Image (spheres, rainbow, N blue to C red):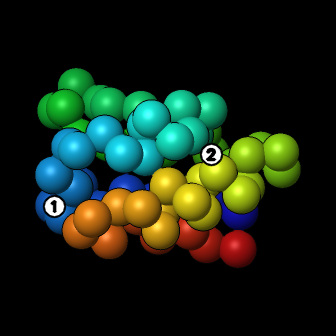
């Protein structure tokens, strides 16, 4: 499973970072990004929760 954050859509609200810091962080442009290549198995549910909580739907998760 891979998480991808659309940098053009992200508004830097921080919801994903607060829900799943094991996968998401802020980059040098202060936008959220996935800092792992593959979502760890034990973080899949929280990564999906972060995706679903994004107010602008900037996160996509590829199975």
Mark 2 surroundings within 10 Å by alpha-carbon count, few (fewer than 14), some (14 through 19), many (20 or more): few
Q: Position of residue 2 (x, y in %)?
A: 62, 59
What mark, if any, has residue 37 been given in the picture? 2
Q: Residue at (22%, 44%) from the top-left corner? A: 13
Q: Describe residue 47's horizontal placement relative to residue 40 as left or right.
A: left
Element under disc 2: loop
Q: Earlier in the sequence, mark 2 or mark 1?
A: 1
Q: Is residue 42 visible?
A: yes
Q: Residue at (35%, 61%) from the top-left corner? A: 54
Q: Residue at (36%, 45%) from the top-left corner? A: 15
Nearer the observer, 47 or 62: 47
Instruction: Give the label, 2 or 1, closer to the camera.
Output: 1
| Numbered circles on residues, count | 2
Q: Position of residue 44 (x, y in %)?
A: 73, 55
Q: Is residue 35 visible?
A: no
Q: Position of residue 35 (x, y in %)?
A: 51, 35
Query: Label 1: which residue?
Result: 8
**Quarter of the image where one finds residue 23:** top right
């Amino acid at each position: 499973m891979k998480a991808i954050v659309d940098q053009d859509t992200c508004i830097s609200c921080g919801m994903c970072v607060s829900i799943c810091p094991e996968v998401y962080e802020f980059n040098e442009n202060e936008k959220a990004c996935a800092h792992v290549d593959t979502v760890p198995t034990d973080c899949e549910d929280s990564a999906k929760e972060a995706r679903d909580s994004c107010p602008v739907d900037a996160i996509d998760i590829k199975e």
